[in-house]
Amino acid sequence: MTDLAAPAGALEPSAALTPAAADAGGLARAVPPLLHGALSALDADLGAKCVGWTTDADGKRVRVYRRRMELLAEALEPDTLQVVIRWLSSSRRTSVSTRRCYADDLLSVWVPLARQAGYDRFALGQLTTAHLELWFGCVTDTDPDTGRPELSARSIRRYTASLSSLYSYASRAMDPPPRNPVSEDVTPKIDEQDASTATRILEKDEVRAVAEQATRLRDQVLISLLYILAGRVTEICQADAQDVHVHGEGPFGRTFLRVTRKGNEPRDLEIPRAQAKLIDRYLDGRASGPLLLNSQGQRLDRSGALWISASLGRAAGVLNGDALTPHVWRASRITHMLDALYEQNGQQGVMAGLAQVMIFANHKRPETTLRYWIRRDHAARNAELARTGEQVLEQVIGDWLGDDGSNT
C-alpha cells in the first residue's frame, strides 16, 4: 500500500464502536434506533482493516487502521447503509469471516466502480449490467507486463457472488426492489477439476523449504498452525492466547487451540506436542490478548499473515514467484492427507478415509474435500499418460538431444 497520513477517526484494531461512540461521528444517526443493536454487534464482528501506512514520532512505519463499519458509513448512501447492515447481520451470514469478506468486497471493488461511474457514494440501483460488463472486460484483459489478467476467474466469481447476494437480500427488503446487475456474462464458470485455476499446492519438501526460511518464532508458529491444523487464516488470526489450553498433566497432557470455525462454530483443535511447545515458547508466559501479534504489538490480521507467508515463499523460491497465500498451506495439508490415504490403500483408501479428512478440514460437504483428490489424481494420471507417449518417441528424442546436448 502507498503511504498516507492517518485519516481522521482512525482507530486501533481493538477499539470498539458502541452506539454512543458511533453517534459522535454521526454513524448512529445514519441508521434508525432499531438498528443500533445490530450496528454495534456488526461493528464488533467486522473489526478494523489496514488502510495504509504512516510514520510515527520515532520515524518508524506503522499501519493505519480504520473500522470497517466507519468506512462503509462513509462510502454508502444512508438508505443503502441500512440495507447493508441488515444484510451482513442476517442469520444467513453467521460467519465473521464471510461478513468481513463481503464488507471488503464492497469497499475494494464495488464502491470504487460506482465512483468511476460518477457517483460520490455507492447506492443500490446505481450499477447496471453494462457497468459490470465494462468492469469485467477491464479485469480480464491481459497485463502486458505479467501476461496475466488483473483478476482470476475465481476472484471475479467471488466478487460478483457477494454483490449478487446483496441485491438478492435488497430485493426482499426494498420496495421497489433494485434490479440485480450481475448476469451470467460477468460470472465465469469454474471447472473444479482444472488444476490450473485451483489453489496451488506445495509438495512436502517445499513445505519444509519454506519453513526453514522463517527467522522469527511468530512466523514459524503462524505457518505451522496453518499447515498442521489445515487452518483458515481468519481462524488462526482471531485466536487469543487464552484459547490455548491443556487437558491433563505431565506426559498425559494434551494441548488444544479453540478456534471459531466457519459458520461461527467454536471447535477445540488438538495441537501436537512439538507444536504446543513452540507456541508455549512464543507466548513466553503471556496468557491473554491475541495469540499472534504484529510488529506493533497488535493482533496479526489477514493481510499481515499474507505478507509473512508470501515473503517466506519468495525466499524459498516456491510457486514460480506466485504469492504463497495462507490458503495454500491449508490446501497443501488437505492434499497431503489424501495422498497418505492413497499410499496406504489406493483409491479405496481415499474413499474410506474421505469423511475423516472432511471433518478435519471443516468442510460441510464431501464434494468439497473430494475435489482436492480429483485434481490431484487427474494430474498424476495425465503425467503418467504423457510419459507413455514419450516412451514411443524415446529413441528419436534421444537422437535429437544427443549425449553431449549439441543438437539444438
Image (cartoon, rainbow, N blue to C red):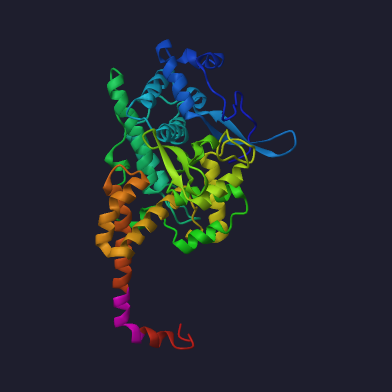
Give the answer, above or below, for where 15 lies relative to 255.
above
- The residue under the point 34% across, 29% down is 166
Q: How far from the left and from the top, in percent, is residue 387?
A: 32, 75
Count of numbered badges drawn on the protein: 0
Q: Which residues are magenta?
A: 387-396
Q: How far from the left and from the top, in percent, is residue 9?
A: 60, 23
Q: Quadrant of residue 35?
A: top left
- The residue under the point 59% across, 39% down is 293
- The residue under the point 45% across, 56% down is 147
Give the answer, above or below, for where 108 lies relative to 341.
above
246 horizontally vs 380: left or right: right
Magenta span: predominant SS is helix
Residue 145 within the magenta-colored segment of the rendering: no
Q: How far from the left and from the top, in percent, is residue 23?
A: 53, 13
Give the answer, above or below, for where 43 lies relative to 322.
above
Q: Nearer the viewer, residue 264 or 126?
A: 264
Q: How far from the left and from the top, in percent, is residue 360?
A: 36, 47
211 horizontally vs 363: left or right: right
Q: Which residue sits furthest right?
A: 58
Q: Is residue 290 visible?
A: yes
- The residue under the point 31% across, 81% down is 391
Q: Nearer the viewer, residue 358 or 310?
A: 358
Give the answer, above or below, for where 118 lies relative to 135.
above
